[in-house]
Each structure stands twice: as C-alpha cells, then as structure tokens.
Image: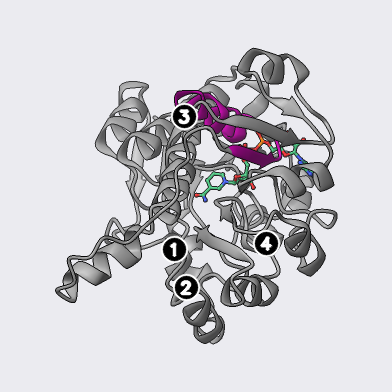
C-alpha cells in the first residue's frame, strides 16, 4: 500500500504534488480553495483527514498533541516555512514524530521584498501614486538608496541575501548579530557592529532576526530615538520586534523618514486592525500583509523542500539537518 500524504497548506503547486506522486506517494488534499489556509479546519475535520496518513504537509492549522496521539501511523509533519509555533513540539518529540521545516526556499523573495520596501519608501511611491491618482503632476521628491548606509539587524540567510543585492547600490552595509557569520560578512563587504552604532549610523535599518523573548520589541521607543534622524525602518521579519505605537509617533513627528512593514504584532486579529490601519495609513508607510516570503518561485521552492523531506522520512532516509526540528523515531 502506498503511503498517504495529507497536504493541507495553501498554495501547494502541481510540481510539488507531482514530486510526491512520482515517489510513489498518494496525495490527499483538504478540498479547501487553494488560497484558504488550513486553520479554517476544525480538529474533527483534521482528525478525519488524517486517517491513514503517514506524512502531513501542514500550513497554520494547530497541530495539537491529541491529534498526533490519535494517529499512531503518522511519521512526519512538515511545515512549508520556517516557523513551527502551531505544532505541539513536545508531544511530537514524546511520540517520536519527525517535525520538519523548509528553510531557505523563500530567502530571495523576502530579500527582494525588503529591497522593494526600501526603494518604495525612499522614493515615496505611495504618495506619488496617490498624487497622480488625484490629478497632481507635480513630482514627489524622494531619497536615494545609492551609496547610503544600510544597517541589517540579524545577519542570517535573508540579511545576507539583502547585503548581496545592496552591492549593486554601492551601499555601505552594517550588520549586528550576536552570532555573526564573519566569513559571510567579509565576503559581502559587510561591517559587523554593535546595535547602538548601527542605529546611530544607518540611513536604512532592516530587521532580519527571529522573534524571541530576548528580541521582542528590540526596536522600542529608545531604539527609535537612537536611530539617525530622517532614516527608514524596514520590518519583513516579525511584528513583535517593533513597538508599533512608538513607531507611529516617530513617523508622525517626522523623526523618521518612513517605514516599510510586512509584519505586525496583531496580525490576523480583527481587534488590532484599527491601530494597524492608523499606522499604515500614514503617507510615509508602505505595508503588505506578511507577503514578503510569498512569490511563485519562493512558494514553489519551499513546497519542494517540504515534499522532499516527507519523501526522505517515509523512505527511512535522514532529511537535511537544517530541515529537522524534531527527529522522528517511528
Ligand atoms: N515576512 C515573511 O514572509 C518572512 C518569510 C521568511 C522569514 N521571515 C522572517 O525573517 C527573519 C530572518 O529569517 P532568516 O531565514 O534570515 O533567519 P536566520 O535564522 O538565517 O537568521 C536570523 C539571524 O538572527 C540572528 N539573531 C538572533 N538573535 C539576535 C539578536 N538579538 N539580535 C540580532 N540578531 C539576532 C541569528 O544569530 C541569525 O543569524 C525571521 O524572523 C523569519 O521568521 C519572514
């Protein structure tokens, strides 16, 4: 009997599905429209869908311990993406189910997005667009990225991809990371500095670090006050990294030139919308709804990484170490 894989994440493209089938696996889909995330399914529906399933490529549906426990045939839960906060990791570990992520697939997409936001905010494209829509031909005067100083907070995969792109702008690139990859910094001509020096000197500050207890609100009122006057903040990482109320004030007072925000602390929560609308309604803010990692190419790459991990586990092959959060024992 071929093993069955449940694919419940949205935007799973035909080439990744074909990869699973070519490897002798049966693919089960949820029947939800392709752009609807699987957290729309309740636990009873997930329970039914998981019947006989050995591999699960999951989106944002909560993977509770009781669900894992109810399906002893389940060997691998793969997330397309790098976060896994919706999976009960302790239960998976205790029950010997492999939990995997798909790192690296959308780095290029997020790096492009960060660059796009830097340029869009600096060139005031939102105001320009609105002015022309309102029939005003007078040009909106922006600022360049060329030869500016860009500070990257966090210097992992995505920040390195941003630094690579910035070479074309002859930018001076600074980075702060408590565990810096010195070889990558040297190779890309990036200066490693401490956070206060980065904030003081950068014309653009771009965040590329995870949200943890230590990094929550790393850009708080004090950090915003320490940023170079007239600089730009870009956040394509996680909403909780920035004190959004303090950012709004800094933008309204004109201390910052503008901000590009792809992520928000209250993402997906309707109660947070009024405050988010106030922030993104400012003329010097460009926003997107956690879309930085979403490109056709990025989704396709991450889908294939997730599919390959499931294939590996079901064949008894060890998946690449960077994909494994919990090693399976089933
Ligand atoms: N918006 C999106 O669609 C999207 C998509 C993918 C990733 N992301 C986010 O982008 C961020 C970066 O991802 P990545 O793949 O480059 O991660 P990564 O793990 O490769 O790099 C993160 C870096 O942050 C560093 N770091 C940890 N604590 C720090 C601190 N206190 N100060 C400064 N640096 C610190 C780490 O040492 C590491 O080098 C993550 O938050 C990730 O969730 C967002």
Asked whether, in this view, residue 29 is left or right of residue 113, the answer is: left
Categorize mark 2 by other alpha carbons within 10 Å: few (<14), some (14-19), many (20+).
some
Looking at the picture, tell me which residue is in the foreground, 300 or 330.
300
Q: Which residue sits at x=83%, y=57%?
A: 213
Asked whether, in this view, residue 8 is left or right of residue 210, the answer is: left
- The part of the chain drawn in magenta is 149-168
Mark 3 and mark 1 lie on one chain; the one further toward the N terminus is 3
Residue 112 on image: x %, y %: 42, 38
Check contact, mark 3 vs mark 1: CB within 8 A.
no
Check contact, mark 2 vs mark 1: CB within 8 A.
yes
Asked whether, in this view, residue 113 is left or right of residue 300, the answer is: right
Number of numbered discs visible in the structure rendering? 4
- The residue where tag 1 is placed is 287
Asked whether, in this view, residue 225 is left or right of residue 31, the answer is: right
Height in image: 303 above or below 236?
A: above
Q: Which residue sits at x=34%, y=64%?
A: 126
- The residue where tag 3 is placed is 169
Asked which secondary structure carries label 2, the reply is helix
- The residue where tag 4 is placed is 66
**Residue 272: which quarter of the image?**
bottom right
Mark 3 and mark 2 lie on one chain; the one further toward the N terminus is 3
**In which quadrant of the rendered image does the C terminus lie?**
top right
Residue 30 on image: x %, y %: 35, 57
Q: CA distance from mark 4 to mark 3?
A: 52 Å
Q: Is mark 2 within 8 Å of ligand 1?
A: no
């Amino acid at each position: 009997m071929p093993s069955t894989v449940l694919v419940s994440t949205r935007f799973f493209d035909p080439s990744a599905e074909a990869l699973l089938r070519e490897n002798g696996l049966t693919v089960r889909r949820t029947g939800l429209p392709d752009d609807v995330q699987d957290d729309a399914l309740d636990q009873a529906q997930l329970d039914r869908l998981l019947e006989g399933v050995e591999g699960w490529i999951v989106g944002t549906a909560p993977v509770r311990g009781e669900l894992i426990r109810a399906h002893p045939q389940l060997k691998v839960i793969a997330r397309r993406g790098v976060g896994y906060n919706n999976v009960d990791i302790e239960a998976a570990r205790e029950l010997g189910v492999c939990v995997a992520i798909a790192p690296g697939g959308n780095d290029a997409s997020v790096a492009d997005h960060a660059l796009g936001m830097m340029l869009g905010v600096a060139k005031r494209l939102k105001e320009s667009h609105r002015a022309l829509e309102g029939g005003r031909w007078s040009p909106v005067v922006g600022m360049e990225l060329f030869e500016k100083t860009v500070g990257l907070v966090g210097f992992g995969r995505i920040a390195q991809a941003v630094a690579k792109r910035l070479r074309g702008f002859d930018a001076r690139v600074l980075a702060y990371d408590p565990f810096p990859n010195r070889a990558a910094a040297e190779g890309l001509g990036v200066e490693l500095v401490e956070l206060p020096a980065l904030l003081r000197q950068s014309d653009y500050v771009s965040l590329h670090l995870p949200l943890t207890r230590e990094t929550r609100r790393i850009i708080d009122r004090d950090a915003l006050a320490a940023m170079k006057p007239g600089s730009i903040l870009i956040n394509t990482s996680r909403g909780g990294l920035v004190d959004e109320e303090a950012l709004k004030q800094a933008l309204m007072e004109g201390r910052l030139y503008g901000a590009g925000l792809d992520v928000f602390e209250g993402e997906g929560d309707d109660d947070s919308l009024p405050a988010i609308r106030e922030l993104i309604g400012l003329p010097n803010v460009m926003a997107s709804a956690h879309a930085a990692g979403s490109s056709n190419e990025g989704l396709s790459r991450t889908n294939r990484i997730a599919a390959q991990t499931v294939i590996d586990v079901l064949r008894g092959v060890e998946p690449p170490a960077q994909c494994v959060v919990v090693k399976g024992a089933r």
